[in-house]
Image: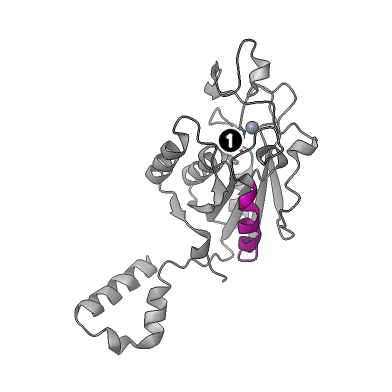
Amino acid sequence: MVENHRRTLIKAAGAFGIVQLLGLGSLRAFAAGNAIRPGSGSALIVVDVQNCFIDGGTLPVKGGADVVPVINALASKFDNIVITQDWHTAGHASFASAHPGKKPFETAQLSYGTQVLWPDHCVQGTDDAALDKDLKLPTAQVIIRKGYHKDMDSYSAFEEADHKTKTGLSAYLKQRHIDTVFVTGLATDFCVAWTAMDARKAGFKAYVIEDATRAIDLNGSLAAAWKSMDRAGVKRIQSKDVVSA
Ligand code: VGL
Ligand code: ZN
């Protein structure tokens, strides 16, 4: 709000040809108009940067490893960091192998609706489910694991696929007086998008840092996800927009 107001004022000043009167300091502030400084009320959420979603894993996302240096560089700009891990049981309901006659990337009707079926991935305690070894987040404070109920998936870090069962993340953030989240990681069109939209639903301001994500993009799912996120009030930004406090 304050930023917008200031931009409007500077625009108006320019229109009247008096922009010189503002001096260089103000122009610099204007040039930095997109800069976002996360403070103690913000958290970086790093979604599912696990071996399973990176080349060599069981459900590799194209370019998945590329998010790691971007996220590592973002980490120093945040007071609060939350990591998530997709953490399935063996034989999980989201695995095609649990549905005779079905193949990965087909769908099935489960009690809570349509479920995309995936290759077996991110099974609890396996090396495939471990965080990528190059991810360096020494200051991260909590790891939220999700998708551990055998009969229900959970793309979102906030709630499971029935849109009722909570992971506890919303309460955790609220108790820590965090009201804004910046979502990064894998995959843009599934776990990142659902996390960002559920953050909105739970009353948080939500940003997705696009160049810190990569997508699966199944049947147009990436474009659809950006559309839904936009409608939900999720803001799409780039890592260069985030500056140190
Ligand atoms: C994810 C598919 C299945 C994700 C997790 O992290 O986006 N996608 N499980
Ligand atoms: Zn999964």
Pinpoint residue 96: horizontal percent, then vertical percent: 63, 20
Colour mapping used in the image = one colour
Q: Is residue 65 above or below residue 238?
A: above
Q: Quadrant of ligand 2?
A: top right
Quadrant assignment, res 164? top right
Q: Residue at x 39, y 46 (%)?
A: 230
Up/down of 121 relative to 9, above or below: above
**Label 1 crowd bin: few (<14), some (14–19), many (20+), radius 10 Å:** many
Q: How many marks?
A: 1
Q: Nearer the viewer, residue 162 or 214?
A: 214
Q: At x 58% / y 35%, what residue is drawn?
A: 155
Q: Residue at x 54, y 68 (%)?
A: 243
Q: Is residue 46 magenta?
A: no
Q: Position of residue 3 (x, y in %)?
A: 38, 69
Quadrant holding the N terminus:
bottom left
Which range of residues does the magenta coloring cover?
65-77
The residue depicted at 65 percent of the width and 57 percent of the height is: 69
Residue projecting furthest to the top: 101
In the picture of the structure, the residue carrying the numbered disc 1 is: 155
**Secondary structure under badge 1?**
loop
- Secondary structure, magenta segment, majority class: helix
Percent x, y of residue 61 = 60, 39
Q: Amino acid at mark 1?
A: Tyr
Residue 198's x, y, as percent? 51, 41
